[in-house]
Amino acid sequence: MNALALSTAPHLKAKNNTTKIMAIMLVALLPVVIYSIYLFEFNAFFIILASVITCVLTETTYNIFTKKFSVLDLSSVVTGVIFALTLPPTVPLYAPIVGAVFAVFFCKLMFGGIGKNIVNPAAAARVFVLIAFPTVLAGNVWKDMFNVSTATVLPSINAGNFASNVEGASMLNLLFGTHAGSIGETCALMILIIGIVLCAIKFIDWVIPVSILSASALFALICGGVNSILPHLLSGGLIFGAIFMATDYTTSPRSNVGKVLYGIIIGALTILVRIYGSYPEGVSLAIIFANLLVPALNKISIKTTMGYYQKRKIERMQKKELALSSQKGGN
Amino acid sequence: MRGVKFKDTKYLSNFFVDEIKVEPELVYINLHPNTGAPSEACVKVGDQVKIGSLIGKAKEGVSINVFSSVSGVVKEITEFDGKPYVIIQNDKKNTIKKLSPLKDFSKENLIKRIFDAGLFGLSGSGFPTHIKYKTDKKIDCLILNGCECENYLTCDDVLMKTKATEILIGGKLLASIFGLKTFFVGVLDNKKEAINILREAASKLEGAKAIIVKIKTRYPRGAEKLLIKHITKRVVPLGGLPADVGVIVNNVATAYAFYNAAINNLPLTDRYVCVSGLGVKKRGTTIVKNGTTILDLLEAFGNETYDTAELVEYSNTIRALRDEERATVDKNKKIELEKKIKLAVKKHNEAIKGEVSKIIIGGTMMGVTASSLLIPLGLRDGGVLFLTKNEYNESKPSNCINCKKCIAVCPVRIRPVDIAKSLEMGDFKTCKSLNPIACIACGCCSYVCPAKLNLKDQVVKAKRLK
Ligand code: SF4
Ligand code: SF4
């Protein structure tokens, strides 16, 4: 054996890796998880647990068959937690289980594992269970909980009588999460703070959430007037989606222009689906749709290469000179 | 912020070690250390040479003169790895042959002296210096690069600390070629001592003004184009040269070599080299002759974890076998000897027990790994690192998770991940439109990638696409 290791430069690498990134994500999600367990008690706890365990088991089984161990990178745990947090606290446990298998197996592993998926697994699974089990997600199963009859306050905004119908959900309730909603999307204020921290440490890119939120505010203003801006922003998991789902590394665009467009598409679609569509929840649908556009969005970028514009300028000047000299020659 | 920051590793070797003298038995002098054409050997086997005797004559165009770094007898003229080498047996008498003194410091004389003394980019670029100065563009700014942003390396740091005045005089002479009265020296602020010494020397400098620019420490601040942008606010056009914006950048080591050439009439035969890494017991920076092997350095710097005697024995066997192999004409015997050499090299490498598991020539970000201790150092190599297992990390590449960290870190603002992906898909047109040509091969993208992908290699590959 050769005693000296050979490699190409750089020989030193930063200490971070995929697993660490996923661990940071889990830490960021932890307050949301804890608060949701505090709010919805065992309901939330079991849903999250079922979802996470199913995700991990799915990936492990797949790993055993393919003999390539990828489950240790924690990405399936993150998917499991995020997916569970988008569900209402009253769903029967089979919904998170089926959804988790769908998320990990069909949305991630089938595409070639982490980094290769096209749509956000959690968002796709959320839409999948919405379509597969419409009664448990959109029905009025848990009326007595907060005196609100659907997953979020949104249907009442749609009906145009937001203030009169929603007794449990004042603006303050929306902000602190003490209203009916999905497990994790309840406390808008906390999610917002987490989001700001994540942006500050450059863990996620601020461009995406900011453009999503401003685009949806704008569209809410156009379609529903000033009074509907805040309820739209604070409810229905918009902030949760903007911070935890739309910023998912793999399924968001790489160029800055792409990021802005991606945010605008998600924001606009969310509001449009909410107001004119038949599903109250637009966020997951909008995210999936925008995910599909990412390969195209990646192509739109502004050249920032150092010296590129200087080179173009020189080329332009040379052309001009050439044109001038040929003119002179003609005369 | 673009670029990356390292833990401080320079303290390991940022001092001059007086007591250690590296006096190799044999030197292996590369006749093609530069970019451009190799020089032509102008000595024969058996010729007597002195320190500073011309052994490789520059060809037409981009080429340099190469000088003997020891006094002794030419033992062999041969080829390793496709590069021409002259092997000289050192008689350890250290007799010196100087260049003829300069009559005056006129522009032509100085440029001629740069050429005569065989100066070329000592920071790793290897670009012949005289070509830079033969430009017909208008130059209004000279920058001496003393940034040394690479991890571990301290050769320029120590040089600035010990030879500040000489560097500044060299800089003054270089500036005078273009009639400039001021020039800049860029130094990173992790070299506080060097900055102070340089500032003091600058205040005493007569005939020109040296402005010492303190730059915030970050890798790769010392890259030519980034340094120009930092100091002059000018941006070198893509694919262009610093001369296009009226700037010339030289390494401080080159300025020092020029001082030696112009004032002391000594051609370029040695340089400051740092020996660092936790794998050696003694560390530090010292003057090393061109063509010294890593083994000679290791012998001089010593190490309890090695059985140096055993290593020397092995390498002597290898040398003897190589000699024999070259002498034989018989093909079969040659093959047999080659096998023997391979076996000996293997044994020799196994003898490097201890903790060292990687030897790097250069810094950890841009250096190359050495496959054996018999590799000679050239004038471009500012350091040899003997790294232990804990000092570098090796990890298997996994899937790109599209985290965009490589885009955020790239100092020249290209998009490594996009380039790598389009290269992988064979979409060369898109790949080229992403300007991989701007890449300075700094390695930051590979450094930050959480999936541990070797992005730099991909981008450099894309750069070479026609
Ligand atoms: S692409 Fe080139 S210049 Fe950019 S970070 Fe990678 S190696 Fe450095
Ligand atoms: S740093 Fe690595 S994982 Fe992140 S986008 Fe670049 S190539 Fe992909």
Image: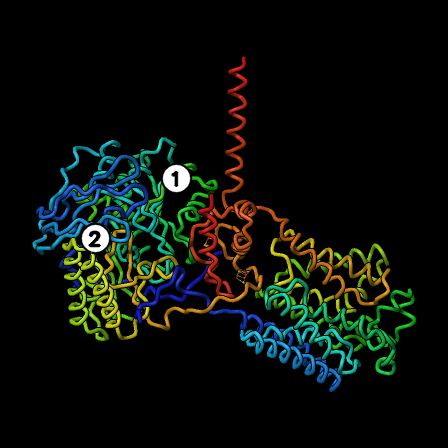
Query: What's the chain of the residue with tag 1?
Result: B
Q: Is residue B204 visible?
A: no
Q: Nearer the viewer, residue A115 or B325?
A: B325
SS type, badge 1: strand
Residue A290 image offset from top left, x and y in percent: 71, 58
Residue identified by numbered label 1: B247
Rendered residue at 21%/44% (across/down): B66
Left or right position of B47 against B252: left
Rendered residue at 41%/48% (across/down): B227
Q: Nearer the viewer, residue B76 or B449?
A: B76
Q: Mark 2 belongs to which amino acid?
A: Asn
Structural crowding at the residue carrying mark 2, measured as other residues with C-alpha within 10 Å and reported as few (<14), some (14–19) or many (≥20): many
- Image disc number at residue B194: none
Q: Mark 1 belongs to which amino acid?
A: Val
Examine the rendered structure and indicate whether residue B45 appears above or below residue A96: above
Q: Nearer the viewer, residue A279 or B84?
A: B84
Label 2 to label 1: alpha-carbon separation? 29 Å
Query: What's the chain of the residue with tag 2?
Result: B
Mark 2 and ligand 1: say if the CB distance to the nearest ligand atom is below 8 Å: no
Disc 2 with disc 1 on a shared chain: yes
The single residue placed furthest to the bottom in the displayed view is A42
SS type, badge 2: loop
Q: Is residue A231 visible?
A: yes
Q: Quadrant of residue B89?
A: bottom left
Residue A41 image offset from top left, x and y in percent: 74, 86
Q: Which of pointers 2 and 1 lies earlier in the amino acid sequence?
A: 1
Examine the rendered structure and indicate whether residue B316 appears above or below residue B355: above
Left or right position of A128 against B175: right
Residue B304 image offset from top left, x and y in percent: 21, 75
- Image disc number at residue B290: 2
